[in-house]
Amino acid sequence: MSVEFRNVVKRYGEATAVAGVSFTVEQGTLVTLLGPSGCGKTTTLRMIAGLELPSEGRILIAGRDVTALGATERDVSMVFQSYALFPHMSVLENVAYGLRRSGVAKAAANRQALDGLAQVGLEGYGARQPSELSGGQQQRVAVARALVLQPSVLLFDEPLSNLDARLRRQMREEIRELQQRLGLTVVYVTHDQQEAMAVSDRIIVMNAGRIEQQGSPRDLYERPATPFLARFMGESNPARGQVRRLDAARVRVTLGPASLDIDDTRARDGAATVAVRPEAITVETAPGPAGALPGTLAKASYLGTHMEYSIDTEAGVLFATCPRVDRPLAAGDKVALVLAPRGVIVVEDR
């Protein structure tokens, strides 16, 4: 089922947490609300769940206006950051809890709970206590408890933040596989850009209660519309440069004495903020090839699999990564930076 926000505002006294947000989550897709702490993403999720009611605007689920309805009147389930499992109940009892509260007979609820555990790979775990499970297994129990209610929309609030890096990677893959296999409509909240890019059909980036930009993970990473997006979606180097349009599809970007042509349909002629991805910079010893940006190495750090460099250039201080750990450069070395067009982005100033 689809979810639609129409000019939704949420105020707490004089403070505005969400300021006129509009978006649509299509049926069967996973859409992530992404942004820094305090941007309004969790408040937005709670308004979908009915745990908060909007101050203005309308919320529709499957075309039905649910703006004034509470949480129990919406066909929505939520997986919380803390898992919220009952420690005194078995795994099976935890998963069956919502069904029993809805009036389902115990035997039928237990059968559905066993099916739910099977869907998340926890067959045979029903008799265990939550304290006997790992963090990843507890997360699966929380997902199973939400799934057995067969909600129109499944909500995730920072579901992986309590797990270590390896488990986070595993669980995000499992959540994505489950969503696609069952055709679920999912709204997912996180502050982790990599997590959002790994699981999402579409990402809505929020900043200060508003939508900064929305689109596919590739769109947001490769074509950020604002300096905030360029900084927030992965590493980027802000630099000041000049732009000159060549034709409808391409522009020439000049950074100090270097210039290169990139695909761009939006940028205007003149001074501009240019985002340069670290992985788009190849560091060569000076003088380097024609068209390279000269610089002086300010800092060098060895990280095992790669080197990290900070380089002083006419366009500003640029951060770059280099896989050549066997031939590291040192602070003070003169270098030449070769920029890959795909990692150079002209962004709008707001």
Image (tube, rainbow, N blue to C red):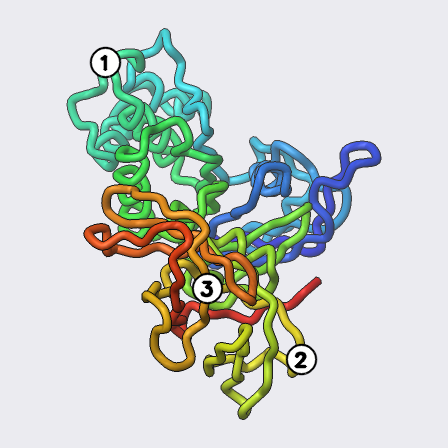
Instruction: Indicate the secondary structure of the residue bearing disc 2.
Output: strand
What residue do we see at 25% from left, 55% from top?
323
- At x 42%, y 54%, the residue is 332
Camera-near label (2 vs 3) is 3
Query: Hey, what amino acid is under mark 3?
Result: Gly
Is residue 192 placed above or below 239 in the rendered structure? Answer: above
Residue denoted by label 3: 295
In this view, which residue lies farthest toward the bottom?
247
Element type at mark 1: loop
The residue lying toward the viewer, choosing from 187 and 295, is 295
Which numbered tag is attached to residue 270?
Answer: 2
- The answer to whether any part of residue 261 appears in the image is yes
Q: Which residue is mark 1?
A: 128
Between residue 185 and residue 196, name the one nearer to us: 196
From the viewer's side, name the closer residue of 290 and 269: 290
Residue at coordinates 40% horizontally, 14% vertically from top-left?
Answer: 86
**What is the C-alpha distance between the residues marked 1 and 3?**
61 Å
Residue 259 % position (x, y): 49, 80
Which residue is farthest top? 88
